[in-house]
Image (cartoon, rainbow, N blue to C red):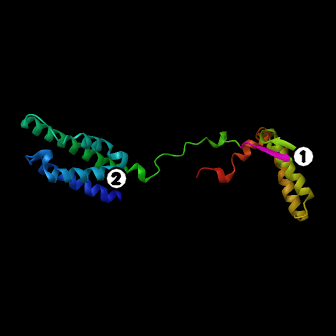
Amino acid sequence: METKNLITELKALTEEIPALMKIQEGFHNPHIKAWKTKVEELLQEGGTTCRKPLDILKRMRNHLGGDDFVNRQTFLNQLEALQRGLKESIHTIEVFGRPEKKNTLPSWGKPKSQQRAVGHLMVGDEEVSTDNITIHEVLDCLVSLAEDSNDLTQEMRQTLIGGLRIILDDDLLQPFLTRKLDTLLGHWPEFQVK
């Protein structure tokens, strides 16, 4: 059910409460039983925002024994408590909406700085862990590949190798370039939370 319709129906049912309080039979009246069932269905539709009035509604006693005056007062008190709970829930839904309808909290995954890839690579005949290879070594391999590649023109090769050499030879970047491959692969775009 759409939030707008839920609010409209809950308001209409809340407005019926003063008329229900005038019914002498209390919980035994069929109209009140039907009203209570409708309210319960709507409150369940409202989710966690409607938990308080739903709890009140479920605690409302249908079959009371003893003095009629006590039964009548109990009936009125429970309806008043339900009315307050319904008004609070309606107001909360109007202001904040229903939490089930939107993603209210961000993903609480690890920060990007702590993400790591785990695994081993086969380099030639040797198995190497991703936490044993540095970013500097990966960029060195890229330089070597560019030097040996037939897919690049001489101009493309010089542009690529020149840019990589500037990065590799920069002393200020060395602390970053000594980080391990597991950190680099932990930032793989397809694994990032959107």
Question: Which of the image's four quarters has the N terminus?
Answer: bottom left
Task: Please check the rendered image and state whether residue 120 is part of the magenta-colored stretch, yes or no.
Answer: yes
Residue underneath mark 2: 45
- Residue 125, disc: 1
Amino acid at the residue labelled 2:
Glu
User: Residue at left 63%, top 50%?
Assistant: 192
State the CA–CA distance, disc 1 to disc 2: 61 Å
Residue 51 percent across, percent down from the top left: 33, 43
Dot 1 or dot 2: first in sequence order is 2
Compared to 151, does 20 lie above or below?
Answer: above
**Badge 2: residue crowd in 10 Å (few <14, some 14–19, many ≥20):** some
The quadrant in which residue 129 appears is top right
What kind of element bears circle 1? loop
Amino acid at the residue labelled 1:
Asp
Q: Nearer the viewer, residue 84 or 155?
A: 84
Residue 31 percent across, percent down from the top left: 15, 54
Compared to 40, does 133 lie above or below?
Answer: above
Classify residue 175 as left or right of residue 18: right
Q: Is any atom of residue 170 visible in this view?
A: no
Task: Please check the rendered image and state whether residue 16 is part of the magenta-colored stretch, yes or no.
Answer: no
Q: Nearer the viewer, residue 23 or 128?
A: 23
Q: Give the residue at the far right of this rendering.
A: 148
Residue 64 percent across, percent down from the top left: 15, 38
Compared to 13, does 105 lie above or below?
Answer: above
Residue 83 percent across, percent down from the top left: 21, 45
Q: Is any atom of residue 64 visible in this view?
A: yes
Q: Nearer the viewer, residue 32 or 181?
A: 32
Classify residue 163 as left or right of residue 67: right
What kind of element bears circle 2? helix
Magenta range is 117-122
